Image: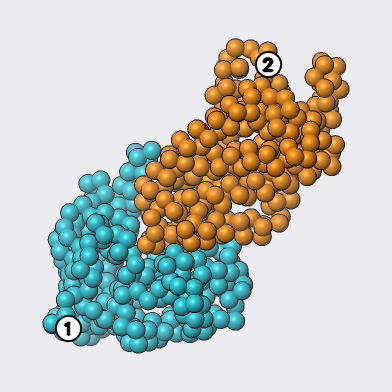
Amino acid sequence: MIDHPIIRVQHLVRTFGNVKAVDDVTFDVRKGETFAFLGPNGAGKTTTIKMLTTVLRPTSGTLELDGLNPVADSTEVRKRIGVVFQDPSLDNELTAWENIDIHGALYHVPRRVRRERAEALLRLFELWERRDDLVKTFSGGMKRRLEIARGFLHTPKVLFLDEPTLGLDPQSRNQMWTHVKNLNATEGVTVFLTTHYMDEADRVADRIAIIDHGKIVATGSSAELKQQTGADSLEGAFLALTGNTIRDESASAEDRVRQFVKVWRR
Amino acid sequence: MNVVFVLWLREVKKYLRSRVQIVASLGGPLMYLGVLGFGLGPVFRRAGEGSYLQFMAPGVIGMTVLFTAMFSGIAMLWDRQFGFLKETLVAPVPRVQIMIGRTLGGATTAVLQGVLIFAVSLVAGFRPASALAVPLAFLIIALIAIVFAALATAIGSSLKEMQGFQMVMNFLVMPMFFLSGALYPLNGLPGPLAFLTRIDPLTYGIDGVRGVMLGTSHFGVALDIGVLVGVGLVFVTAGAWRFSRIEV
């Protein structure tokens, strides 16, 4: 534990109206590890990611990424991160290559490096042959792979993956994680992910934080969490920690508030 | 600068690829030129105002530029819906560069569309006063394009849903077109209408194009350009400000 953690979150709070989406959250992510953020719908995962990736301001608490503050040094933080959002963020009317190329320009990757790296990544994610096809002709899995390849292009220090495998078949999921873990090992990228698939978290994550109702309820490796709850699977541990109630209600309450805030802001 | 260029290029590429849309967008202007131009032509001539086609061609070009530029605002809502906007907003780039790239891209497609309509109007029988007038006229057309692309950016940054754009079309874009004097001369209008035409920036744009292409303008080309530059500065500032405040 000589290394300073790459991400440090302390007493983080974010409210929407009077709903606390993130409520006094504290955790560290170590350099080079794969860190999974698990929680039921509406638990505050995406809200936390949005704050770490500079697109949302915290209500209170402190955030640190590679020693920088995402609020005050947003541009510097953005240079160090790659983000794959929950919703796709590709331009469907452009080709795979053009999407990657624009990304390289936005992140000031020198042209020559951009070419080489783009080719290597597209080959790795098995999209090289399709590089000149419009993204709208791609399947869901291909789009996801392209987004992840793009996220690696500017050699970020931290890659955020918000439910990257949502809606993918087991083959695509499996293959995607193999590539991500490879890059995690070879380039030392810290990976911060959220997912609803427990088997996935179990397999890829070095450490896991479970968040519920905006609060962290447990942190540790998969083995530690199982041991702590006496469950024999991560899914069992997850359910033991977060309960069996379906969270549509809390999620929709938050959505309602968001909707309200949206209308009110006009 | 590279960022501005790349985002500009993206808009232009997308425009050039959307052939169907380009053809479809010719429909409206062709109606105005062909049907109104020839249909109202005799009345206009009898009223002693000369050729209606000559008169309205600059107006129809202005209309096309207005519509195309304003549609770049829709493109932004589209990007918000389908996510590409987020990709640009988390990039380590000042937002103002993103805004300028997008706006110039939108303006460029509007000018290209204007060139297309200009060519069509030549076929229909429109004749500019001199060949030299054409480049100067397109300078003014470029100004019109920037003014409205910037306005579209400001509006697009403030709207969250597609539905909002219908409102903008019906209560802003259509009135701006109809009040611009694209279809009728600006002299001798009833008081309230005269007033409304004079607070519409497009009025000055079309008047300027007419002034250069036909040698007859209501306000004088210098004033027209002055107003466009002034309004353009205001809209670009507003667009940059609204764009900087987008939250995803």
Q: Position of residue A71 (x, y in %)?
A: 25, 57
Residue drawn 30% across the image and 55% down it: A56
Q: Which residue position holds label 2?
A: B187
Q: Chain B appears what colour? A: orange
Report the side of A217 relative to A191 (left or right): left
Query: Which corner quadrant of the image does residue B66 belong to?
Result: top right
Tell me the residue at 74%/50% (across/down).
B23
Q: Amino acid at mark 2?
A: Asn
Q: How many marks?
A: 2
Determine whether the residue tagged by mark 2 lies in a helix, strand or loop.
loop
**Which of the two residues, B173 or B101, is positioned nearer the viewer here?**
B101
Q: Nearer the viewer, mark 1 or mark 2?
A: 2
Q: Does B1 sit above or below residue A169?
A: above
Q: Residue A161, position in %: x, y?
A: 36, 71
In the rendering, at what x and y percent does residue A243 appear? 22, 68
Q: Is residue B228 visible?
A: yes
Residue shown at 51%/37% (left/top)?
B232
> Is residue A216 placed above or below B38 in the rendered structure?
below
Q: Which mark is residue B30?
A: none
State which quarter of the image contains the N terminus of chain A. Answer: bottom left
Callout 1 amino acid: Glu
- Is residue B167 visible in the rendered image? The answer is no
Examine the rendered structure and indicate whether residue A184 appears above or below residue B134: below
Residue A224 marker: 1
Q: Residues within 10 Å of mark 1 (few under 14, many from 20)?
A: some
Q: Chain of mark 2?
A: B
* Chain A visual colour: cyan
For residue B54, which quarter of the picture?
top right
Which residue is farthest front? B132
Respond whether the residues carrying marks 1 and 2 are from the same subunit: no
